[in-house]
Image (cartoon, rainbow, N blue to C red):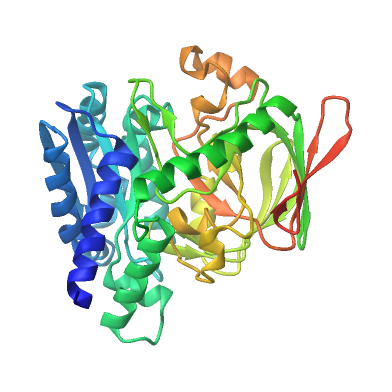
Amino acid sequence: MSEKSSHEQLLDTYAKLAVRTGLNLQSGQQLVITAPLDAVALVRRITEHAYKAGASLVTTVYADDETTLARYQHAPEDAFDVAPAWLFNGMAEAFRGGAARLAIAGENPALLAGQDPDKLSRANKARSMAYRPALELITGFAINWCVIAAATPAWARSVFPGIPGAEAMDRLWRAIFTCTKADLPDPVAAWERHNDDLRRRTEFLNRRRYRALKYAGPGTDLMLGLAEEHNWKGGGGKALNGVFCNANIPTEEVFTAPHKDMVEGVVRSSKPLSYQGSLIDGIRVRFERGKIVEMTAEKGQDAFRSLIDTDEGAARLGEVALVPHSSPISRSGLIFNNTLFDENAASHIAVGQSYTENIRDGSTRSREELAALGANSSLVHVDWMIGSGDLDVDGILADGTSEPLMRKGEWAI
């Protein structure tokens, strides 16, 4: 078997895995895909497998890094308060009508480095406001959805700097196939076993009913309260439309909802964050009563500031996730500069919107009820990594006693 045919077979397996295991696409269901233009070969294979699974219609919206950059270089000043609400409203309408959602990541992590931070802030806020109707359906797990990735030239260069383009692409694709289990003899069975492992973790955590998590490590001394009636999740789950799906491929996390008003202390990031074309690194923040009150970053500080200034909830936490330092993605030794992968190499937190599935019976509760329980509300939801081989995490019980959860980044339970 030639190297090329091997890659083509793996790409086909990966596409099938996205449709069958990631989305679990149902016969008669529509599918909405968003993807970078460089991912067209993968999109074509996914589309083929979607129709084989019985999809009634597959619609793909492509993004192109060069045209995105052209906006910041040449658009008039007042163009950065505009977002395609018509497009996002259409997506929300598709989701309300039962369509599944597949997002393919692969954009240039540093595409907008050096661009005017005010333009970035305004454009990101306008986009977040326009995307809110669709985001609420996703964070509410109303539909089966999945996020995967495709290797692209710019992304490959950022992961493997100094390596020739073709070799960098090959290395990145091989890393993607390995981290997503697409290169195993039976990827579907491997994902079933993996989901079982993550489910056992969530069952343990839900039985313990911790009221808070205590983090200690280099640059980190954080007490993170958990929302009342919080619910730990991990791996695949059933959406409100009754379809069992895996929202992230890959995934190594178990996650729940922090209490938006009960986070105190300091924390620093352990890996770079790629956000809307900006690479942010060396983040250090201090929380008081749940809100970020001090922030610095060694790189991309303006971009991070614009993120947490999006709205009131953007400076508070909407997710906390635990990931062992020995996860396969961490063992790869790669910094992917892509949140889908880097968040599954390290424990992380997310500023912004909470997932309603992380509150018991969250889908049946009003916004006011969710807020009273501690769930956060925001136009954004952005994960950033704080875990490492030097991080300890304790679970704090209702009576104040402490139990070790993680030691040196590994599970202690």
Q: Say which quadrant the C terminus sits in.
A: top right
Residue 345 figure quarter = bottom right
Q: Which of 34 and 179 lies nearest the eye of the viewer?
A: 179
> Taking 357 as reference, is 15 left or right?
left
Q: Horizontal and vertical percent for residue 294?
A: 69, 52
141 lies above or below 45:
above
> Taking 61 as reference, is 204 left or right?
right
Which residue sits at x=17%, y=36%? 53
> Taking 39 as reference, is 348 left or right?
right
| Number of marks present in the image shown | 0
Q: Say which quadrant the N terminus sits in.
A: bottom left
Q: Which of 230 and 27 lies nearest the eye of the viewer?
A: 27
Q: Is residue 64 visible?
A: no
Q: Is residue 148 visible?
A: yes
209 lies above or below 131:
above
Q: Horizontal and vertical percent for residue 239?
A: 38, 25
Q: Which of 127 and 172 lies nearest the eye of the viewer?
A: 172
Q: Which of 6 and 317 lies nearest the eye of the viewer?
A: 6
Q: Horizontal and vertical percent for residue 177?
A: 35, 62
Which residue sits at x=39%, y=28%? 136
Q: Horizontal and vertical percent for residue 143?
A: 32, 27
Which residue sits at x=17%, y=40%? 50
